[in-house]
Image (cartoon, helix red, strand yellow):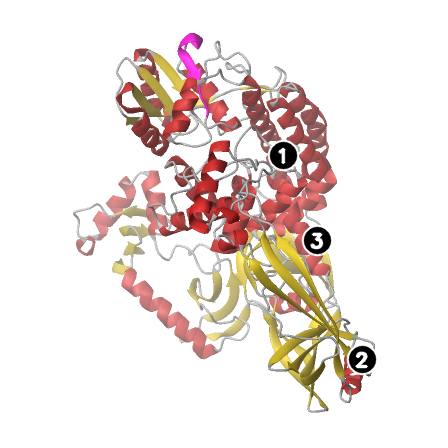
Amino acid sequence: MTKKSTATGGKAAKAKPKTSRSAAKPKVAPARVAGRGEGGDMLIVESPAKARTIGRFLGREFTVLSSMGHVADLPRKGMAVDIEGGFEPEYIVSPEKKKTVAELRKAAKQAKRVWLATDEDREGEAIAWHLARLLELPTELTRRIVFHEITESAIKAAIAEPRGIDQHLVDAQQARRVLDRLVGYELSPVLWKKVRTGLSAGRVQSVAVRLVVEREREIDKFKPEVSFKTAGEFAAGEGRLAAKLDTDFPDEAAARAFLEAAAGAEFTVAAVEKKPAKRSPRPPFTTSTLQQEAYQKLGMSVRRTMALAQRLYEAGHITYMRTDSLTMADSALAQAAEVIAAEFGPDHARRRRYATKSKRAQEAHEAIRPTDFRKDKVTGEQDERKLYELIRRRALASQMADARVERTVVKVEVSTRPERFIAKGEVILFKGFLAVYDPGGDDEEDGRVLPPLERGQRLEPLEITSRESFSRPPARYTEASLVKRLEELGIGRPSTYAPTISTIQSRGYVERQSREGREREYRVLTLTEGKVGAETRTETTGTEKAKLFPTDVAGLVTDFLVENFREVVDYDFTARIETELDEVASGEKNWRETVGGFYRPFHADVEKAGELSRAEVARSRELGTDPATGKPVSARLGPYGPFVQLGTKDDDEKPKFASLRKGQRVETVTLDEALELLKLPRVVGRTAEGEEILANFGRFGPYVKYGTKYASIKDKDPRTITHKEALAAIAEAREQAAKRTIKEFPEAGVRVLLGRYGPYVIEGKKSATVPKGRDPAELTLEECRELIATAPAGRKKAARKASSGKRSPGGKKKK
């Protein structure tokens, strides 16, 4: 378990990281140069784009180079942490960065001074620390500078006030990296043995998965409550008034009773209340609020938003995009006020300072804002321009006056009933910040103008409708709302939100899907011209767009972790670890003690979990009994996915299995659905040659099997496909196979086929690619066998994969 390290966590001068022994000739992009300065000052940033922008500001006096991101990290394989040695990390230079590091080292030796200008957060500080060690930079000739924005004034101001490397920030980054490695390295193998090979667990990702799983279970348990909501439309002088009843009815009978009573009633304005009100702007963006608003207004994923924001930052258009601060520099506030006064008038400007509610706000960043408020547009792709405009409008609005409105509430009495109709309206008297940025009203009546009304005024009912309504289940998470929830719980930081959201999807725990809704009937009662009518209508409910759905393995892994590693997925504990990392960053805590406090109880849980059997972890869910056989029906998750099972291993007959369909889950599949699945494979008929045709679902969709061959049936259902349809699918599959066949030697079982990557020869399970320049149609039997005999093992495997018919729709290899 223990590995000795040659790098030290806190002694930068002595540490010399190992380099990986793999990949003798890595393919690397060289360090990028912007400007010249042989023997002069050298400045290092992370990205080529950032280097180009800064190079334009500094001119020929500086050589600006790029490290191309992280230059050192823990190796991908192995623990690489010396647990007994105080959790010492073993860093290596990855193969693809060797050339970059060598170029930087050579340039550094020729430089008069080296300026480390990596990002100002923990990751950036760690990169600067690694560069100082790897390039063996003398302290007296090394300067560390940070800036919130890539502008000429900001860069030159930073150069005027250099500092040293902040070891506390470095330690906080090291602590996070080591914690994540310990969890991943020790917990993932447990999941491989107990659940499924290839699974992973993480300190933040597993909590995010748990949130999605628990929300889905809330939705599964949800039972909608029915009520009847009533609304009326009235003639009011020259205008019309739409109002809602202040009471909902529990059933149709109560709603009908109200409408019947209202049929002969008088409707009178009981009160007209007008009140001044104001609406205030929201603060400028932080990382999480930018991700949420970009999703809501622009439909961008979290990952896309951050990629575009990175480009805008590196081009010098916006301030640093990984931040939880709400502050803006005095110079930015002054410029915003000038732009607002020029575009909208001085009365629209109001300087505001926002305080970050979270005590955990990381480092001294600014909020996300334009570097130049005068620039209302930027060049770049369309989404880049849209995101910039969103950032600019939000930041400008944050420094503008409140919107002044007049809100009106009208109450209408019903002479025959105690309930009242309520109408709400709003008139904007002064737009203020709304002239730039509309945050989207939470109230559907925002902006509605009511007709002139007086107390005691009689209203003529045009139509009163009572509609059956259903309460809604909790909303599934979107990427943006999951980020918001993580932030509310204090889990993760601006730099980790996007990677976490990407990881839980790439690892197969969560799927981002859009799903069509289902039709639902509802009742509508209508009062018109003194008569009450009723009808049944239909609506579509449950439509989902770009929502996060947990997979079966997510539920199983979450349950396993909650039962055996509660602290790993405990919301409060995870937030507490984040707070401790913040304390490490501020120098209040020692990073090794923080890691040790987490690791000791965690490792004990790992050892206990190792004693569990796979059956104890992947418990089956009993669905009921098959009426036809009397055997039990169950559902569970196996190594190859979720399935239902008829019978048990103790029965005389072998149990029957069927995979779940897409959209079905172990936790919610019903007995009836399971019995439908277990009807497959279904005998459809026979081919003209007498081969039995079986229809079934497979990993790659529905298919029919005839003899040892398979044919996809695409959008047909195996449970209902006809014999004629199956024969048509088989004929199409044979036609496609014939097109792939270049030449055959039936007596020898050798074929020359056209695969996805070109022609190849196959005999049984052996195959070989046809060399370029040789005509596959002219090959003799002897030449085919020679190609197979002399093909390297790797080539044989590649050739087999090249076949476009390599797997059946059922997921089995063809014989």
Residue 304 seen in the current view:
no
Residue 71 in the image: x percent, y percent?
Answer: 42, 24
How far apart are labels 3 and 2 at the CA level?
46 Å
Q: Earlier in the sequence, mark 1 or mark 3?
A: 1
**Image quarter hosting the N terminus:** top right
Q: CA distance from mark 1 to mark 3?
A: 23 Å
Q: Is residue 193 depicted above or below 180 in this figure?
A: below
Of circles 1 and 2, the one toward us is 2
Look at 34% across and 39% down and name the residue there: 793
Q: Is residue 26 above or below residue 346?
A: above
- Give SS at disc 3: loop
What residue range appears in magenta?
138-146
- In the rendered structure, find residue 620 and report the number of the disc placed on it: 3
Give the crowd class for mark 2: few <14, some 14-19, many >=20 residues within 10 Å.
Answer: few
- Mark positioned earlier in the residue sequence (1 or 2): 1
Give neighbour class at mark 3: few <14, some 14-19, many 20+ (Cα, 10 Å). some
Residue 801 visible in the picture: yes
The image position of residue 118, as x and y in percent, is: 43, 26
Three-letter code for the amino acid on which mark 3 is drawn: Ser
> Which mark is drawn over residue 254?
2
Q: Which residue is nearer to you in this view: 9 or 354?
A: 354
Residue of label 1:
187
Residue type pointed to by label 2: Ala
Near-viewer residue (480 or 338): 338
**Residue 453 in which image quadrant:** bottom right
- Residue shown at 63%/54% (left/top)? 278
- Dot in front, 1 or 3: 1
Work out how far the residue at label 1 is from the one at label 2, CA to CA, in angstroms: 58 Å
- Closer to the N terminus: mark 3 or mark 2? 2
Mark 3 or mark 2: which is in front? 2
How crowded pointer 1 is (Cα within 10 Å; few <14, some 14-19, many 20+) is rated as many
Disc marking residue 548: none
